[in-house]
Image: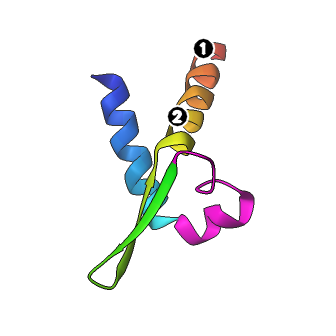
Amino acid sequence: MRWLIVFVLAFVLFNFLAGWLKHIGLGRLPGDFSFRFRGKEYYVPLASSVLLSLLAMVIGLLF
C-alpha cells in the first residue's frame, strides 16, 4: 500500500513540475509517457517514478 501512495504522490509532483524536470532529464526516460487530451498535456512518468521511489527508499534506509 505504501508504494501506491508514493507512486500517486510522484505522479502529482511530476505533473506540477513537468517543465522544470524536463530540463534535468526526468520525465524523458524510457517508460515515461505524455499525451494531449482536450488541449492539456498530461504526463505519466512510470520510469521516473520508479527511479525516484528507489532513491527515496535508499535515503530512508540510510537514515
Residue bounds of the magenta highlight: 18-31
- Mark 2 surroundings within 10 Å by alpha-carbon count, few (fewer than 14), some (14 through 19), many (20 or more): some
Q: Split into 4 quadrants, where in the image is the C terminus?
A: top right
As for residue 26 lying within the magenta part, the answer is yes
Residue 15 lies in quadrant: bottom left
Residue 7 lies in quadrant: top left
- Do callouts 2 and 1 mark residues in contact (Cβ within 8 Å)? no
Q: Split into 4 quadrants, where in the image is the N terminus?
A: top left
* Residue to which mark 2 is pinned: 50
In the rendered view, tell whether residue 55 sits above or below residue 44. Answer: above
In the rendered view, tell whether residue 12 sits above or below residue 57. Answer: below
Q: Secondary structure at mark 1?
A: helix
Total marks placed: 2
Which numbered marker is on residue 40?
Answer: none
* Residue to which mark 1 is pinned: 61
What residue appears at the point 65 percent right and 64 percent down from the top-left corner? 22
In the rendered view, tell whether residue 25 sits above or below residue 9. Answer: below
2 or 1: tag closer to the N-terminus: 2
Observer-side mark, 2 or 1, equals 2
The three-letter code of the residue at mark 1 reads Leu
Residue 48 lies in quadrant: top right
The residue most toward the right is: 24
The three-letter code of the residue at mark 2 reads Val
